[in-house]
Amino acid sequence: MSDLLTLAGSLKQLDQARLAAVISSCVSETKNCQDLFDLSRLLLSRRELESRIRNLGSKDLEDLEHKKPTKNLTHALLASSDNVFEQAGALMPELATPTHKHLSEPGDSLVIHETLLTITESLFACERHWLGLVRSGIKAQDAKELGLTVKMAANRVQKIFQFAMHAGLVRSHAERWVATDKGHAWLSADHPKRWELLAESIMDLPAIELTDEDLIEQLQAAFPLRPIADVKLLAFGSLIGLIDQGAPTKLLLAAQTSIPKAAKLVSEMLPEPVSKLIVQSDLSITSPGPITPSLHRTLDVFTESEDLGLACRFRLSALSISHALEVGMSVTEIREFLASHSNHELPQPVQYLLAESESRFRELTVLGSALGTIIESDDEILLMQISNESSLAPLQLKPTAKNQLGSRFQSQLIYFNLRAAGYAAVMVDESGQVISPRERIDTEPVLIDQAAANQQAELLLSGESQEPAQEDMTRQLHFALKNKLKVTLRVELPDGQLKEFEIEPLGIAGNRIRGRDLEKEAELTLPMARIKAVWLS
């Protein structure tokens, strides 16, 4: 109890920003904490103590082992100015040292080039295709198709896409992946700035002075108990040349001082880009070397990438030109762009394709509404062909009126499936204006949890209690039951008094929880409605 009182007193002395940081760092739910004593009890639970102990450096662990109160241990809320908290000192010897797999992936300049190229194609794929959501990122088939373009295994494409997710370049929206505003800004940047934005998102190493020795071994020596599976630099660092075969590179050593300066080194490592294009009569466009980011960005608007690497090949098609017109590029701009970068008159087949695509633009339109989607075209044969297309059968397309097919599914899903089947569909609104498939959404907001922590810190410091939501407590109890965890319950007794029970949940049913009372070593049943607070022990 003395440690509890001491810790509550220490929390009372913190300012709001520091207390909010403490709340945010908790691995357990803090919504049930009605006052600083509740928060102190949570911070002294095994789960919270273990989290803070494992983040200590080797010198701090040594001080904790010898029960020597220090400034660092006090800051970590593991000790007061006079004593190490009893629970913290008792828990440390029980914690096992984690093991880590050696990093063996290369991180040379070619890998950096491939990563930047793959992220670029992934962002363009978000507006050209329906990239459905799965827990690991994109679906295996989508990763395989992207891999064929960039000449890379599907599992590596998936890892690079996960990197783009972590960096905030893509975000889930309306059941698919779309590029964020940050992703569009990334596409507009040059290679050094692109690298810089990626590096900033994963520079999460704990404070450590690095050498060129094995990075895992250095981290284990500095933080013996820390699990490092969640360190994003270890997960993605090799993809942008920060780690090579498990060792820190000159880029990582430079980035620890200044990421922008390290980005300048990247520009010297990457292959020299070219801006010359060869436009051929078979509708292909090739470059003799890697192309500049700005050239790649423009080509991806009106062509389809076929083969990307140190040399690149793109292809013109009715679908790709239709896409360019949808996002606001004109056929005249396409002609001028190709002519200026090839220094030759465009082949006749290319001229014909551009003219035909322009004349047939909006031949097939997709209109969404609250009731579903309408596909419309004056070409009855085209609509009949679409209705008989076996790959589109799951969309349940049915004639609804003359020159129309209807579906109950949303317009974007219909649009992307039509284009995947080879039909140059165009989304329109009720006034007939073309809707661009290029979504623009904000990067995932990250301030919501911090705002909640600030609000809770303010309430705790002011002494105002806050009643936890019943659904939050119920969720915690189910979590404890599933994972066989012990919990402490604050229960209102029939006479109005509050009493705490430490139990091991055995079952939840009929608005009651059944568990084993750890103090009396007997089974008890409590009504859920009388539970006022829950803590994981």
Image (cartoon, rainbow, N blue to C red):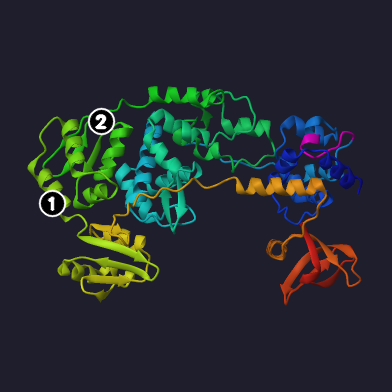
The boundaries of the magenta stretch are 74-82
Name which quarter of the figure residue 512 lies in.
Answer: bottom right
**Residue 35 at x, y percent in the picture:** 81, 51
* Closer to the camera in the image, 510 or 106: 510
Disc 2: CA contacts within 10 A as few (<14), some (14-19) or many (>=20): some
- Lateral position of residue 104 relative to residue 496, left or right: left
**Residue 440 at x, y percent in the picture:** 41, 48
Identified at 37% across, 31% down, the residue is 110
* Closer to the camera in the image, 246 or 267: 267
Identified at 15% across, 69% down, the residue is 381
Identified at 47% across, 42% down, the residue is 163
Task: Please name the residue that numbered disc 2 is placed on.
Answer: 289
Q: State yes or no: residue 149 in magenta.
A: no
Disc 1: CA contacts within 10 A as few (<14), some (14-19) or many (>=20): few
**Residue 50 at x, y percent in the picture:** 74, 45
Identified at 30% across, 68% down, the residue is 374
Compute the Cα span from label 2 to label 1.
31 Å
Q: Quadrant of the C terminus?
A: bottom right
Seen from this angle, which residue lies furthest left? Answer: 348
